[in-house]
Amino acid sequence: MASTCATYWLVRAPTAAHARGALHSRTSFSSRVVPLLRLRLQRSCKGFNLRASVKPESETENEASEAPEKAVPDVKVDFEKDISKVVRKTAATFAPRASSAKNKNPAQPGTTLYSIFEIQAYISMAVGGILSFNLLFPSDHPDIWRLMGMWSVWMFTIPSLRARDCPAKEKEALNYLFLAVPLINVTLPLVWKSFAAVWSADVLAFVAMYAWKLEWLGGSDNKADGSEQ
């Protein structure tokens, strides 16, 4: 019985060779599996970062479409400011002196001088229309009276209105008109040789500039919005 048990133990007991083979198989398995797991983990991390960094096409398109919309108003505002500066500097030669504590413009709103300048401006515009239409001092050929009537808006109306202490928007409109009216008076006769047509174009430009700068067309809407609020 004792010999049988010893023989069984010798057969079942692991030898040193078996132990080394088992250890080698385990190390080889771990050496193969661990790099594979690391590679899969790296790929999964890279894929996650790629998906996180890549935005959907709809979001990129929306951002691309919003960027020009934000940039365009700034460009427009800067362009308008530059034009206003150039116009103001160019027309400053004929502008009245700036109001200050020492030297204030006497043509303040509500004063007699302010009213005189306004009446003078619109009377000169009306008389210029009569002269340019050949109703006053009529003649069969171009003369000095019709020429003065054609230039009356630029020579008398605009300087008279500029001599007042008017608001900034109205002063800006008059600055633009001071530069625009001579261009009209010089270029329009090349196409249409008519004193009356030139005077009419000046008046239309005058009304259009005031409507634009003083916001005549949008004033009612702004008042309505303010009353609703």
Image (cartoon, rainbow, N blue to C red):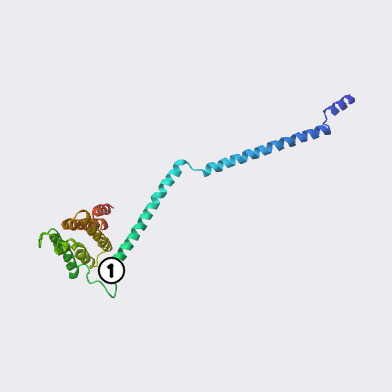
Quarter holding the N terminus is top right
Asked whether, in this view, residue 90 is left or right of residue 65, the answer is left
Corner quadrant of residue 87: bottom left
* Observer-nearest of 45 and 140: 140
Asked whether, in this view, residue 102 is left or right of residue 54, the answer is left
Asked whether, in this view, residue 222 is left or right of residue 7, the answer is left
Asked whether, in this view, residue 179 is left or right of residue 53, the answer is left
> Please, what secondary structure does the residue beneath circle 1 have?
helix
Q: Position of residue 201 (x, y in %)?
A: 20, 56
Corner quadrant of residue 137: bottom left
Q: How many marks?
A: 1
* Observer-nearest of 45 and 117: 117
Which residue is depicted at the point 41% across and 48% down? 66
Determine crowd level at label 1: few under 14, some 14-19, many 20+ residues with C-alpha closer than 10 A: few
Q: Position of residue 57 (x, y in %)?
A: 46, 41
Which residue is depicted at the point 43% across and 43% down? 61
* Observer-nearest of 227 and 45: 45
Q: Amino acid at mark 1?
A: Thr
Which residue is depicted at the point 30% across and 65% down? 90
Q: Position of residue 119 (x, y in %)?
A: 16, 65
* Observer-nearest of 29 and 189: 189
The residue most toward the right is: 3
The residue most toward the bottom is: 102
Residue position marked by numbered label 1 in the rendering: 93
Rendered position, 165 above or below 22: below
The residue most toward the front is: 141
Rendered position, 219 above or below 162: above
Corner quadrant of residue 96: bottom left
Q: Position of residue 109 (x, y in %)?
A: 21, 67
